[in-house]
Amino acid sequence: MEDVYRPAEDSYLLAKHVESLVSGNILDMGTGSGIQAVTAALKPEVKSVLAVDINPEALGEAEKRAYDAGVSGKISFLLSNLFDEVNGRYDWIIFNSPYLPSEGEADEHAWAGGAELIERFLGGARDHLEPGGSILLIYSDISEPDISGYKFDLLEEMGLFFEKLYCVKLSPT
């Protein structure tokens, strides 16, 4: 079975901005262990969270994290490849994307996808945002996606040993 992405520097960078910005109805794309979904659900301004992942093992871990945090009643879980099974519109979409470039068959969904996957995500995200809604996204300078069609706000950058991570807020133009 595929590995579940464990919270790391990128997760905590994004969670800081989830904590300070999101409200309303939230979609946590690629929820992994559920850190972003739980961070959002703990906020009184957040009505509901849909946590989505392609990996059933990740959804199980996210459900356990939500239960342990006492917010399982505020979060729904959905098995989906990006937006394939997602319905509805959301005030915020959170995506700690698997931003490292694909290396072929050795890839794991938890970390590989790069610019191509982020661009596929951005192509579907617009149809799932409420008017005035925004996206919180993490990506790396190793695979910078084309974000044309979105207003770009750099919230924070973090230098790591071999790359720079960016936490950005994107809004459809």
Image (spheres, helix red, strand yellow):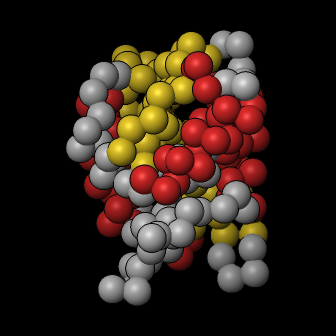
Residue 11 percent coordinates (x, y): 68, 53
Residue 25 percent coordinates (x, y): 50, 19
| Most foreground residue, 7 or 164 | 7
> As displayed, is residue 157 above or below residue 69?
below
The mark total stands at 0
| Most foreground residue, 150 or 110 | 110
Indicate left or right for 36 with 75 as reference: right
| Most foreground residue, 102 or 134 | 102
Camera sees residue 6: yes
> As displayed, is residue 130 above or below residue 142?
above
Say which residue appears at 59% left-offset and 44% top-offset. 62
Residue 94 percent coordinates (x, y): 52, 40
* Image quadrant assignment for residue 157: bottom right
Say which residue appears at 35% left-offset and 62% top-offset. 117
Say which residue appears at 76% left-offset and 41% top-offset. 16
Indicate left or right for 138 with 81 as reference: right
Camera sees residue 155: no
| Most foreground residue, 37 or 126 | 37
Quadrant (top left, top right, bottom left, bottom right) of the C terminus: top left
Indicate left or right for 50 with 8 as reference: left
> As displayed, is residue 51 above or below residue 31?
above
Residue 34 percent coordinates (x, y): 61, 44
Quadrant (top left, top right, bottom left, bottom right) of the N terminus: bottom left
Say which residue appears at 50% left-offset and 65% top-offset. 110
